[in-house]
């Protein structure tokens, strides 16, 4: 049957990450019909039960542009909230090709051996995720993509960075409700997105490659400053000398930053994600960071601050949206813009007038 939505459904199925969740291509209506028929309580029950297809469907609802779907997603999330929070949230950043996905696959596999349940989310602000790159991620994360105790959810394929960040946060919470207890959020280390990821994780890990300075790696100072840990990846034998040098350079660079309030000094470690070398040590270090920050109260403090930041962000975006949608503002905005351009009205006065209209 050729239905107009079939493309969209295809995309959403691709975005669902775990192909093995898909009920198959026999009946293309299956997923959507199921999703629409299921009540909020059905969803909540299934998610709390660790049911991945329901989790995927609920995330798709949250990502939807349809108000009705989104609202349903929000209700599901709201009911799942009491069951969230019980995970270690790890942000991973680094330039394209540094080995983030390979690293997550390696660490995630170690965690599976330890009977933990890893989930992987991604924020890709380039919004250029295509079926091809999602497929590439699946091959990089072969074990995690197919393991029954793991979950991989590719970045939403469209939307503003703010919108993507919002659904990623919501997705993270749903994953926790579904019982995933280590959540990785992968992002490309070139722009704003790492600030967002930093604001949603307990530990922020910066991946680097040996033999290239900051400038060459396109890593901004601010990103290095945000890191709780640094790992030099691809540190196999052939790259060992360069890797050691990079380690020393970064240790020096990090020692110049003011120490974290907890007193933690971000360690610089070496690994080869491809050969699973050094990754377990990094996990152990990450654990000790989490243990230490839990014991010192920093862990919950960071989460509390993040919760407030999220709230503020949502308010800001909501207000922006409402402002932009306000009928009278919409009418007056182009007029005032024109006046500001011509210098007939000052930007401040124009803004005041618009806010006045909005507030009435
Ligand atoms: N030699 C070596 N190659 C690695 C290592 N880790 C990853 N690679 C290779 O580096 C390439 C990129 O790896 P990815 O894991 O896709 O890198 P990424 O950072 O996730 O890339 P993007 O998602 O595109 O930003 C692949 O060809 C990997 O096989 C490593 O430890 N050593
Ligand atoms: Mg990747």
Image (cartoon, rainbow, N blue to C red):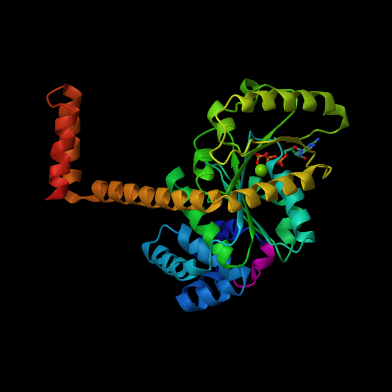
Residue 11 vs 282, above or below: the answer is: below
In the image, the segment drawn in magenta is 19-27
Quadrant of the snapshot with the N terminus: bottom right
Tell me if residue 80 comes above or below residue 103 in the rendering: below
Taking the spot 15% from the left edge, 49% from the top edge, the residue there is 359
Q: Residue at x 80, y 60 (%)?
A: 113
> Residue sitting at 49 percent across and 69 percent down?
82
* Any part of residue 4 in sight: no
In-image side of 353 versus 104 (left or right): left
Identify the main secondary structure in magenta. loop
Q: Position of residue 131 (x, y in %)?
A: 62, 49
Marker count (numbered): 0
Q: Where is residue 8? Give x, y as percent.
A: 51, 58
Residue 267 % position (x, y): 69, 36
User: In the rendered view, would you say 179 is above or below 184?
Assistant: below
Residue sitting at 57 percent across and 41 percent down? 262
| In magenta segment, residue 33 | no
Where 276 falls versus 176 (above or below)?
above
Horizontal side, residue 98 vs residue 85: left or right: right
Q: Is residue 239 left or right of residue 5?
A: right
Residue nearer the viewer, 350 or 31? 350
354 or 263, which is in the foreground? 263
Indicate which quadrant contains ligand 2. top right
Q: Is residue 149 visible?
A: yes
4 vs 162, nearest the viewer: 162
The location of residue 51, given as percent across then percent down, is: 62, 72
Does 25 appear in magenta?
yes
């Amino acid at each position: 049957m050729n239905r107009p939505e079939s493309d969209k459904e295809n995309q959403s199925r691709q975005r669902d990450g775990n192909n093995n969740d898909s009920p198959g291509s026999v009946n293309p209506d299956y997923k959507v019909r199921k999703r629409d028929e299921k009540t909020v309580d059905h969803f909540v029950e299934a998610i709390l039960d660790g049911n991945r297809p329901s989790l995927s469907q609920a995330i798709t609802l949250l990502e939807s542009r349809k108000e009705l779907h989104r609202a349903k997603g929000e209700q599901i999330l709201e009911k799942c909230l009491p069951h969230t929070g019980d995970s270690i949230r790890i942000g991973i950043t680094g330039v394209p090709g540094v080995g983030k996905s390979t690293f997550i696959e390696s660490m995630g596999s170690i965690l599976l051996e330890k009977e933990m349940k890893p989930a992987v989310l991604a924020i890709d602000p380039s919004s250029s995720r295509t079926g091809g790159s999602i497929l590439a991620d699946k091959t990089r994360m072969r074990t995690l993509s197919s393991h029954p105790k793991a979950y991989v959810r590719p970045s939403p394929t469209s939307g503003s960075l703010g919108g993507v960040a919002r659904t990623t946060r919501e997705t993270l919470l749903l994953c926790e409700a579904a019982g995933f207890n280590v959540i990785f959020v992968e992002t490309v280390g070139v722009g704003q997105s790492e600030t967002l990821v930093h604001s949603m994780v307990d530990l922020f890990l910066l991946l680097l490659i040996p033999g290239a300075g900051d400038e060459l790696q396109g890593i901004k100072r601010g990103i290095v400053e945000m890191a709780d840990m640094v790992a030099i990846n691809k540190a196999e034998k052939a790259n060992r000398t360069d890797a050691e040098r990079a380690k020393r350079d970064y240790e020096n660079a990090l020692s110049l930053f003011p120490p974290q309030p907890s007193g933690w000094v971000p360690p610089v470690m070496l690994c080869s994600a491809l050969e699973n070398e050094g990754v377990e040590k990094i996990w152990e270090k990450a654990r000790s960071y989490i243990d230490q920050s839990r014991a010192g109260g920093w862990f919950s403090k960071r989460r509390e601050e993040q919760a407030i930041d999220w709230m503020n962000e949502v308010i800001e975006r909501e207000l922006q949206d409402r402002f932009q949608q306000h009928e009278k503002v919409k009418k007056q905005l182009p007029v005032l813009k024109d006046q500001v351009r011509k210098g007939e009205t000052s930007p401040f006065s124009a803004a005041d007038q618009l806010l006045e209209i909005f507030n009435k």
